[in-house]
Image (cartoon, rainbow, N blue to C red):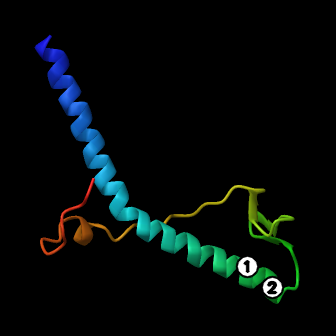
Amino acid sequence: MERDGVEDTARVLRAIRSLVYNRRVLPIIERRIFQAETTIRAHLLVRNSTDDQVGPYQVGLDEDDNLRITQTAFDEWSQMSLPIDEMLYDSEEEPMRV
């Protein structure tokens, strides 16, 4: 029975660490999404179009003005890393509220 308690504690600790990490990176990800969507919308606006093929992606706006993106071919790319190391271990930052 003790073993189950240890495994449960480890599982909860992993969940806490995951939650803290993801809450800290979420603002970075949301900012990147906003910047990317703004760039794509500006591209469509400049082209006076609601659809365009950009590299291996078909981009466009649906009837509700939401972006839709379809990958139409293989794309060899590398995602920028998140600058979170400093954020996660900054001693001056307030503790994360869970």
Q: Quadrant of the N terminus?
A: top left
Give me the disc on residue 30: none
The x, y position of residue 5, in whole percent, is 16, 21
Nearer the observer, 7 or 73: 7
Nearer the observer, 77 or 41: 41
Residue at image point 75% right, 56% down: 73
Quadrant of the rendered structure where residue 96 is?
bottom left
Q: How many marks?
A: 2
Quadrant of the rendered structure where residue 81 is?
bottom left
* 30 on left or right of 24: right
Q: Secondary structure at mark 2?
A: helix
Q: Secondary structure at mark 1?
A: helix
- Three-letter amino acid code at disc 1? Arg
Quickly name the residue at label 1: 41
Quadrant of the rendered structure where residue 20 is?
bottom left
Residue lying at the far front in this picture: please name it.
97
The x, y position of residue 79, in whole percent, is 50, 65
- Three-letter amino acid code at disc 2? Leu
The x, y position of residue 23, in whole percent, is 36, 59
Label 2, label 1: how far apart the Cα atoms are: 6 Å
Quickly name the residue at label 2: 45
Q: Residues within 10 Å of mark 1 (few under 14, many from 20)?
A: many
Residue lying at the far top in this picture: please name it.
1
Instruction: Check contact, mark 2 vs mark 1: CB within 8 A.
Output: yes
* 70 on left or right of 1: right
Q: Residues within 10 Å of mark 2 (few under 14, many from 20)?
A: few
Residue at image point 31% right, 56% down: 21
